[in-house]
Amino acid sequence: MTRTSESYRRRSLLSGVPQGAAALRRVAVALAGLVAVTVFGTVGYMLLGLSFIEALYQTVFTVATVGYSEVYERTAAAEIFTIILIVIGVGTVLYNLGVLVEAVTEGHLREYLWRRKMDTSIEQLRDHLIVCGYGRVGRASTANLVDRGHQVVVIDSDAERLAGIEVPFVVGDASSDDVLRAAGIDRARALICALDTDAATTYATLSARALRPDLVIISRARTIDSKAKLVLAGATRAVNPQLIGGRRMASFALYADVAEFLDEVMHDDDIEHRIEGVRLGNRSPLVGRTVAGVDVPGLCGATLLAVRKPRKGEFVPTPAGEMVLEAGATLIVFGTPDQVDRLRGEAGTLAS
């Protein structure tokens, strides 16, 4: 079996509509049978002395049972052949009608073709985000990403959860390599894993990390103890929503204005300024220069808040001017999207 056929079969199974594939095969077989009957009748009448057009015409109205007069001279051989053609042809036409009616009324074919179209759209995505699990956390993450203009593919094993969803999705187990490939993990920018249990999240994180060692993976931890295990499983960062929610509530209680400002900057689309990170690649022209020499505000207009050292190192808030920027370091800046894009252009890198 070729790689293309294996990929096609895998996507068909993942789509959750194998009945649609079977319906499509039945339609193809039925149409092939109709073509075969037409060829059989045309060739037979040509052997009886008719021209190609006459033979085709005679075959079509014989199979269709419309009752036009014959265009051939009646002989025993012609009549016997016509009887055989009527029996075979009418049976084939009735089978075609039955298959088409079944495919349309049951909806399997429509759903299958819609799923194929979605699979094609997923294959065309680049730099998208994958959300595993469409529960409360997954739904909130998806909505936030879509609102910010990002492309998202959702994975969930429960097809009912995905009913009516407006983003591409794959029905299946998020820990399955085939499911992750169907969601385009090889082309994804990041993966958010928020499954129903820590065990399921751990398995999915392990699978995703094995397929993409360089992928950013954010995993939801239901307990504080599971955070460390998820990081060991390959998560770039493990997040406990309850812990974060509690900390945010405490921050609003103690530093209401600061917390509200940060919340609006990160999540409110009405505010133009954003806090974003720009990672310096090995070939960035900013590598080896000092913070004062780069002069981020003068370079792009954004404000440099902090520098994170390479390989997920420590954060250095308001770095001193003599600090030398290293390859792999991330500049945390506050500015408009245009200012951040200008900095990325000067740094010759993509967003971290």
Image (cartoon, rainbow, N blue to C red):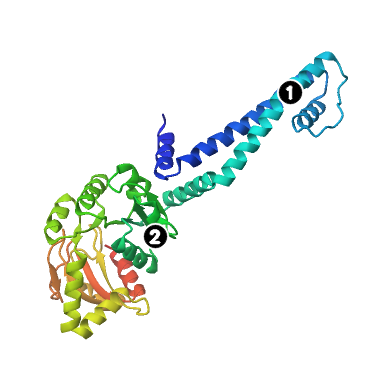
User: Residues at badges 2 and 1 in contact (C-beta under 8 Å)?
Assistant: no
Bin the neighbour count of mark 1 within 10 Å (Cα to Cα): few under 14, some 14-19, many 20 and up.
Answer: many
Q: Secondary structure at mark 2?
A: loop
Q: Quadrant of residue 262?
A: bottom left
Q: Earlier in the sequence, mark 2 or mark 1?
A: 1
Decide: is 77 above or below 236.
above
Say left or right for 32 vs 329: right
Q: Residue at x 38, y 63 (%)?
A: 150
Say which residue appears at 21% left-offset and 84% top-offset. 256
In the picture of the structure, the residue carrying the numbered disc 1 is: 85
Whether residue 26 is visible, yes or no, is yes
Can I make out residue 327 in this image? no
Query: Residue 76's x, y, as percent?
Result: 83, 14
Give coordinates of residue 92: x percent, y percent.
66, 29
Circle 2 packing at 10 Å, graded few (<14), some (14-19), many (20+), is many
Q: What residue do we see at 20% from left, 54% from top?
A: 198
Q: Amino acid at mark 2?
A: Gln
